[in-house]
Amino acid sequence: MTWADTLLLLPELIAATGASILLIVPVLGGRARGHMAKWAMLALMAVTALAVIGSTYAVAGVQQTPTFRAMFAVDAFSVFFKLLFVVVIALVTLLSEDFLSEERYSTWEYYSLLAFALCGMMFMASGVSLITIYIGLELLALSSYILAGYYKNHEESTEAAMKYFILGTVSSAILLYGISLIYGVCGSMRLSTIAAALSTMLSNDALMFGIMLLAAGLCFKIAAVPFHVWTPDVYVGAPTPISAFLSTGSKAAAFAVFARVFYVAFPAFHLDWSNVLAAIAALSMIVGNLAAITQTNVKRMLAYSSISHAGYSLLGIIAMNEMGLRGILIYTMVYVFANLGIWATILMLRRHAYAGESVEDFRGLHKRAPFAAFSMVVFLLSLGGIPPTAGFIGKYFLFAAAVQAGFGWLAIVAVVMSAVSMFYYLRLVVAMYLEEGSGAETIYSPSLRFVTALSLTVTLVVGFIPELPIRQVIESSSHLVGRVVQR
Amino acid sequence: MLDKLWLIPLIPFAGFLLNGLFGKKIGNGLVTAVALAASGLTAMVSTLAVFQYLGAYPDHGRHLDRVYNWFTAGGIGTDVAFQLDPLSIVMLMVVTWVGFLIHLYSVGYMGEEDGYGRYFAYLNLFLSAMLILVLGSSYLFIFVGWEGVGLCSYLLIGFYYDRDYAAAAGKKAFIVNRIGDFGFLIAMFLMFNYAGTVDFAGVQSMAARGQLTPTVITAICLLLFLGACGKSAQIPLYIWLPDAMAGPTPVSALIHAATMVTAGVYMLVRSNLLYRMSPSAMMVVALIGGLTALFSATIAVAQNDIKKVLAYSTVSQLGFMFIGVGVGAFTSGIFHLVTHAFFKACLFLGAGSVIHAMGGEQDMRKMGGLRKKIPTTFWTFTVATIAISGFPPFAGFFSKDEILASAFATPYFPAVGKLVWLMGTVAAFFTAFYMFRLWYLTFTGDFRGTHEQEHHLHESPWTMTFPLQVLAVLSIIGGFIGLPQMLHTPVTNLLEHWMQPVIPEIEGIGKLIEIPVGTEATVALVSTLLAALAWYLARQRYRGRGLAADLATEQSHPGLVHTLENKYYVDEGYDATVVTPLRQLSIFSWKVIDGIIDGTLGLVGYTVAAIGDLLRFFQTGNVRNYALMLFGAVVILMWVFA
Amino acid sequence: MDALTASIPLLVFVVVGTIAVASSILVVAMRNPVNSALFLLLTFLCVAVLFVMEGAEFVGAVQVLVYAGGIMVLFLFVVMLINVRALPDDRILSPYWTGGAVVGAAVFVLLVALVRPGVYHEQNDNPLALRSTTVNARHRVVQPDGTTVRKRYTRQQVVGNSEAIGMALYRDYLVPFEVASLFLLVAMVGAILIGKRELGIDDEDVDPQYIVDRVAEEKEMKEAMSA
């Protein structure tokens, strides 16, 4: 452990310090200047992003030996996700602006909690030991619980936070029990040590239970069936920007962990766990999509849609091959941007006097806000996996990976279910383009406009010229796959 | 031009952007100018490119214009590349020029509609996607166009959003197509897995070198055919096409008759090498094609909506094309695709002109005697009717008979080939019957509509009649590109020679069909006679009498007395023994079989909704319940796992 | 006699363990929060005993100091401050308790099935080895030319209980340990955010004068009550 090692922690340190500073500002008399908080937060995100990029130069190469007694590693994989997280948090910051100014809640604390959540996510991405991952995950979760209940005076928000908190605690207990069983069997929490121990081991119950409990805990975070029950209630109850955060950033972080843990630590027992995860993935896709069809509340529909997307992404983990890992990275990115764009549009309609949540509210949107409606169509097509949007590229990799790994039936379920998903995505398109307007007001602030434009750009760029992002993804993931091959 | 093939789809795309973004601001005049310029320019650029191709490739080889690398990293990608070869050129010419004519027609037809700019924006976008589909050089890249045309079709079907069923019909079309796309996607994954590429040439050369096992090839072929079934409306995925008639009529002509729905045929011909290596897959294609041709031709007889008749007719004609592809006569499939594009576009546009004249009325029972009122429409429609019915020397005759003769003579599965031929021949008989029924009901007899409608009757403006005239002429002469051997004309089988490089003769791989002259003559004679019979029956039954005969068969049982009382003793005899049973068969297949297939899909929908409700039942909102479910899930997981 | 001595730890474990489980059940079964809190205290103490029996004296001591001493006192303080006498006389068990019982039993059976020797990672049998840790040290080395240099080296060294924990927390698990401190900070912030009264959000009127008035009003009320 040297000073150079500490430098690797710089992004996390900056995020944590920044979060603490944001916390102090109102005490120093910044309360009145709530509108400054947004800019402070964005500046913090910019600095963090620079630090993340800087840390790649510090490691001078793709792969960095884990530091801090193999607790923490900066590698291309973690950098990819950290940058994604920073962007997500920055966009959520922009999404939150109107909400905060309207509801008159304490802005500085809100952003501070978001920054802490970011810090937890970054530890999740960089953790190479189960304990680091766990504690990072808890940091993220705790911040999310509080943020989900930020609508303190709204009953649904408090209820959502309460549900999320209780169920989240239960799930993290399950996760922790899994970790302790794995520790008991392998004698270590370091992913590489676990992998080494497992490679010489026969299958045994304690280990299998450990892996399963760990998977169950993570499935809760990514909202995969049957651990999804909290999702619709929380997405609907929580403040809308936080729902956006939960369905994008929080999930992306959980997928980073899922991918790293399973690709690095458990390849030896791939045959044992892949079928169980395949069942979970299939269930998520089926239940998520079918349940979404009957929803009339857009937030609830998106919740179910996000459940089904967890199912698609799981294909990448089940496949356990190069293509699968790339698929997860691409898909996570693609999904995050399409989703943020959609949430921005919902927020645009979300006003006091006016719910902005039911499908009817989208009626005739193409007349009131042509740009928003057009981008919404692109986002929905992306989620449905229609070329040449980004979603197609992501799904393409995931499905191809599943076919390659011999999970053809799962790929078939996935393709059929993404056909079904178009059914409810099109409902919104129909409402926006093929129905008469409801005359409801839409307020399209510059911040929301920016989020939409950025998400649209990413969705189209990844769709039309995916070569560059894919190269990046390959660079970011190849070292993890390398270990699979070595084994 | 050859190195700028990307311009061809880009021009209509630019038109889409202009009209889509500024359509409301710039006014209808400029919208028209932009739309026509975009479609006309792309047609001219295409033609120019074709001439340059002819100069540069005297052997008619494959010209490849690689634009950029879409994605190849990760090993499962492809280039964005356009190709020009005889097959692409045929499709390109049909799509751009028929497309242009229909754009022109739309100017007159849609002139009074709301959303004029939106309409042309979608239409241009469609053209762009369709051009990607026919010019793309790999399965993956044409999939972009494949989905794009589906999307535009969806938007255009739902164009009249004040009509409830339009949006539903659009959605149905899209979802059913997605089911077909699933086959396409999985087929591509198989190609990647086993051939390592999705480039047309790459896959075919891998197959030709024997790198793919027969099982894989059959699987790929069947999955591709599933995709084609969705897009080209074959059993059991045809159900979206009749509903798609909710869209504006020019859209039905362009998308649901001439171009998009033939994409499946195009793709299968593109993959002809794979199919020739898998006779079992070909047999499936031929049988499904035959069944669809027969089945939907019978349904068309019972329809009273002029567009519905044409819709079922399209499904049936697409079935003919698949017969051609399935029995190994790939060229004749494409031949029929071309002639069908001419006469069916002409029919649809003619129907549009009729509907326009009738002030939006589509029910044939309210038409009649329009012959004098709209003369141009009348004669063009007549030409197209004769063409589709298969009378020589009109276009439909040559292409249809080439298909039927090939089915009869196919070397791949002689017995099944005869069966398919039989189905096709009967379907051809029905085709002539329902077309002349349509013709007599619409154009002869007395006018049966309201007085107001009668007063309103008028011939359409020149923007509408000009495309009709062009297409009518093409319906007459279009067949000359594929004159059969037996006629001993100076140029025979022009199209077949032209297509030669695309359908190469390769040692050891499914040979091409040689049709004996005797067979060809016999088949042609049989179907011509049957068409004449059908015309005669339709004439006796419907000429000047409207639907009286139909109503009679529906209401009362045609007893002996009824037959005797009638002075057309013989005709009524025909009626009772041939036509009435046929009509009842038609009603049966429409109401029952169609109903069953549609109902099955409906049932799937209900089941889905029911499952959704069931799932919502679990969503109690009670946190203790949730925690219980969580733990329950863990227990199940561990139990299963241990 | 030997057999008896040998079985004493087992006996203590059984007795203390039973008390721990029983009192933790009572924690949730009691209607009076003070009783619940006291049973929680008992549970903590029993767990502390179990720690000591496993040779983790430091953790045992911390358990008593922090949990039993600090946190419990805080609990009781809060409970008494907000003056909750007893829970309303509702059903404590939800209607789903049968389902819960079944699932709970299933979890229990599954977990019991895991308690098998030979499955887990083999620790060194020597209890001292548990406490040995690698220590950085320096020593003088006389060079051939007569000068001495200090060289770093690491060695295994048996250390005390608390020292071993210190080594683990501040060296092996430094990163997670520090993140845990962030975690606690967030918990604190959350508690304050949820707990504090947000002035003026419910009310239409939010100008500062209103808040000043309201604070003054409350002050008066308090004075009146104390008088």
Image (cartoon, coloured by chain):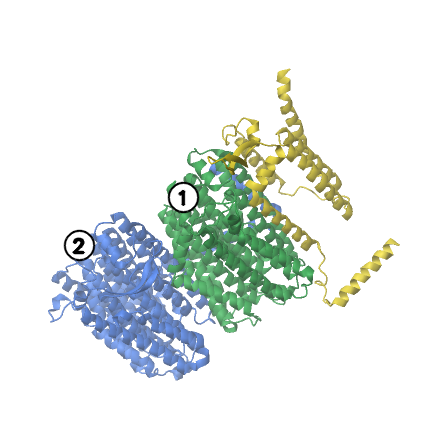
Chain colours: A green, B blue, C yellow
Residue positioned 53% across, 64% down in the render: A344
Q: Is residue B25 visible?
A: yes
Looking at the image, the residue that sits furthest to the front is C145
Q: Is residue B232 visible?
A: no
| Crowd tier of the residue under label 1, counting other residues whose Cα lies within 10 Å: few below 14, some 14–19, many 20 or above | some
A165 on left or right of B501: right
Q: Position of residue B547 (x, y in %)?
A: 35, 71
Residue closest to the eye, C12 or B496: C12
Looking at the image, the residue that sits furthest to the right is C227
| Crowd tier of the residue under label 2, counting other residues whose Cα lies within 10 Å: few below 14, some 14–19, many 20 or above | some
Local SS, label 1: helix
B524 on left or right of A84: left
Compared to B515, does C52 lie above or below? above
Q: Which mark is residue A483?
A: 1
Local SS, label 2: loop
Q: Position of residue A450 (x, y in %)?
A: 52, 67
Query: Are the numbered discs 1 and 2 placed on the same chain, yes or no?
Result: no
Give the image quarter of residue B596: bottom left
Q: Position of residue A39 (x, y in %)?
A: 58, 65
Residue closest to the eye, C110 or C201: C201
**Chain on which label 2 sits:** B
Q: CA distance from mark 1 to mark 2?
A: 54 Å
- Label 2, on which residue? B411
Residue positioned 49% across, 72% down in the render: A370
